[in-house]
Amino acid sequence: MIKKDKITIIAEAGVNHNGDINLALKLVDIAAKSKADYIKFQTYSTDELVQKKLGLARYQKNNTKKNYSQYEMLKKFELSVSDHLKIIKRCKKKKIKFLSSPFDLKSIDLLRKLKMDLFKIPSGEITNIPYLRKIGSLKKRVLLSTGMSNTKEIKIAIQTLLTSGTKKKNITVLHCSSDYPAKNNNLNLLSIPFLKKKFNINVGYSDHSLGLDASLTAVALGAKVIEKHFTINNKLYGPDHKASLNSTQLFKLVKRIRNVESSLGNYLKKPSSAELKNLKFVRKFIVAKKKIKKGERFSEKNLTTKRALIGIPASKWDFIIGKKAKKDFIDNENIKN
């Protein structure tokens, strides 16, 4: 469950298990140790997802150094129902929540039967109306990834989820740049506060850039969900390993997100309790710059401001200037009039 007062951190395993259940279980262990809230995989039936002759995307070719079809590549990484059950069992044992993105209608049904409490819609499905309607009809919490989309498409997707039964408060829109790895000049992180204001909705960030900077910036910009790929080894074969954090980086990311989170506070500008303890030692009061006789008018020539514990605050300067002294003051004496 996504909590309003806490950043939800999703450690994205994706297909970085390479179709090996033992590797998938090791990824669960790493994610749990990092103290992420969720570990996320990808659930699909290759036959339902893609036509057999469709080629690889540019980043898939670059990262795998292969030139076969998407079907051939995805088939290698497909998780069976049995694999899902083993992963969920491991998640429960390690006390980390299980999450997986369904990429077809049958996979939505599978994850529903597995009692998943949160559904992540991949960027590629944002214009898939029957898919969106099926997700919306589940009335679950939803993460809507928006890579490769524009505001019109996002609006239609949100509306489709709403009319299908999902409540707006249960939708979080994830800004995303769908390239692996995504370059800094293509991240457009200012879309995060824009999306929040445009749709008056919860926002997050699905980060495909290298390093930690973008995710930490996203938190500062208002993202309440951070999703980040990780792997056991960046040199392994597969489309996403090169754009993923290693385990050490994942641990650092979670810790630094929590540090940034604790520093955000709220929108109300007022002194903190720690500041209030220092305030009386640094605020200035009105004091005599020299001897002042009773009846003499206060002016910039005979008054100044200094740090003191008592007296008239410097903020009252304009109310004091021009008034007559009611008593004699010695040099450096606090003004009390």
Image (cartoon, grey):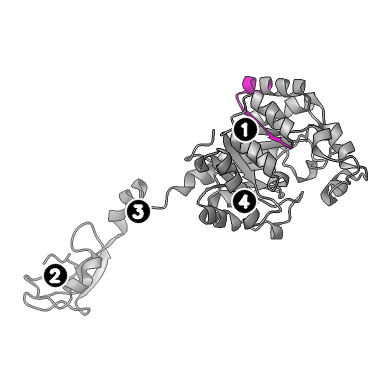
> Please, what is the three-letter code of the amino acid marked with disc 4?
Ile
Residue 108: image quadrant is top right
Q: Please state the extent of the stretch shown in magenta in the rendering.
A: 90-103
Nearest the viewer among 109 and 186 is: 109
**Chain-order first, disc 3 or disc 4:** 4
**Chain-order first, disc 4 or disc 2:** 4
Label of residue 156 in the image: 4
Mark 1 touches mark 4? (CB < 8 Å): no
**Chain-order first, disc 2 or disc 3:** 3
Mark 1, Cα crowd under 10 Å, few <14 / some 14-19 / many 20+, is: many
Tag count: 4
Label of residue 330 in the image: 2
In the rendered view, would you say 317 is above or below 197? below
Query: In whole angstroms, how far apart are the C-alphas of marks 4 and 2?
Result: 75 Å
> Please, what is the three-letter code of the amino acid marked with disc 1?
Tyr
Percent from the top left, x then y, of residue 155? 60, 52
Mark 3, Cα crowd under 10 Å, few <14 / some 14-19 / many 20+, is: few
In the rendered view, would you say 47 is above or below 322? above
Quarter of the figure with the N terminus = top right
Kindly state the secondary structure of the residue where label 3 is placed: loop
Query: In whole angstroms, how far apart are the C-alphas of marks 2 and 1?
Result: 69 Å
Disc 3 vs disc 4: which is toward the camera?
4
Mark 4, Cα crowd under 10 Å, few <14 / some 14-19 / many 20+, is: some
Query: In whole angstroms, how far apart are the C-alphas of marks 2 and 3?
Result: 36 Å
Residue drawn at x 65%, y 58% is 188
Percent from the top left, x then y, of residue 101? 69, 36
Q: Which residue is mark 1?
A: 38
Kindly state the secondary structure of the residue where label 1 is placed: strand
Query: In whole angstroms, how far apart are the C-alphas of marks 1 and 4?
Result: 28 Å
Question: Could one spot residue 268 in this view of the protein?
Answer: yes
128 vs 239, left or right, is left
Q: Which residue is mark 3?
A: 270
